[in-house]
Amino acid sequence: MKPVALTKIRFVKALQCPRKLQYERDSRYLDTSADDEFLESLAEGGHQVGELARKMFPQGHLITEASPEEQVRTTRSLLERQVVSIFEATIRYGNLLVRCDVLQRTGNRLDLIEVKAKGFNPHKDSFLSSRGDHPVRSTWRPYLYDIAYQAYVLSCAYPQFAVVSSLLLLDKTVVVPIPGLNSSFAVTL
């Protein structure tokens, strides 16, 4: 079997169940979630939040090349600039591959921003658990593992930069003055 890059999706999947990586490459085991309308609608919501996040960085460059190799080359080229914002930046280190929602270079610093369509109340919510057996709440682990994996690959591929990672979440405490705004975004793929 041909080696497959360990992407962030595959990494998080392996944390849930290592066997999933073996089964995904075996045609005898089909992934029925690919045809799930509910999961499709959730993904669409994620795309909407991603598009909204891009509006926060109006000078950003979207990586649109078809192949991962072309995406990596374009990302590398853009990172030669002293100041740049990149959407879907693709980073490869050996057999590890990640696509970063937002990657900003400012001098010797790389800001890795992972955009999630998950709500967070900064006054009530916490990533940390009060239980002693695991310091991170189970609902937040996949998100934190996701960005930690991206930060690791980015740090290995670009050791000359200081990597600062963050999650960009929906603030549940903000009241939007426009009724029905959440259903007003058109998504085109």
Image: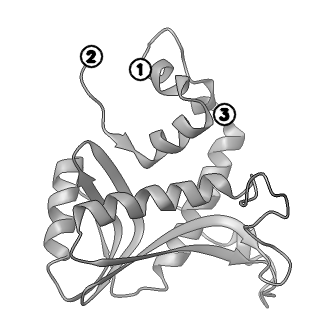
- Where 171 falls versus 93 (above or below)? below
Distance from label 3 to label 2 (Cα)? 29 Å
Identify which residue is drawn at 80% across, 63% down: 129
Q: Is residue 171 left or right of residue 105?
A: right
Q: Residues within 10 Å of mark 3 (few under 14, many from 20)?
A: few
Q: Which residue is mark 2?
A: 1
Which element is circle 2 on? loop
Disc number placed over residue 36 in the picture, else none:
3
**CB under 8 Å between discs 3 and 2:** no
* Residue 16 percent across, percent down from the top left: 62, 36
The percent coordinates of residue 173 (x first, y second) are: 82, 84
Task: Tell me the residue at 60%/65% (across/down).
Answer: 116
Q: Is 12 or 27 nearer to us in this picture?
A: 12
Mark nearest the camera among 3 and 2 is 2
Q: Residues within 10 Å of mark 2 (few under 14, many from 20)?
A: few
Are the two marked residues, 2 and 1, in contact with CB atoms closer than 8 angstroms? Answer: yes
Quadrant in the picture for the C terminus:
bottom left
Asked if residue 95 shows in the view, the reply is yes
Kind of residue at badge 1? Arg
Using the rendered view, name the quadrant where residue 74 is placed.
bottom left
Give me the C-alpha separation between circle 1 and circle 3.
Answer: 20 Å
Mark toward the start of the polypeptide (3 vs 2): 2
**Would you say 184 lies left or right of 58 here?**
right
Q: Type of residue at label 2?
A: Met
Disc 1: which residue = 25
Q: Quadrant of the N terminus?
A: top left
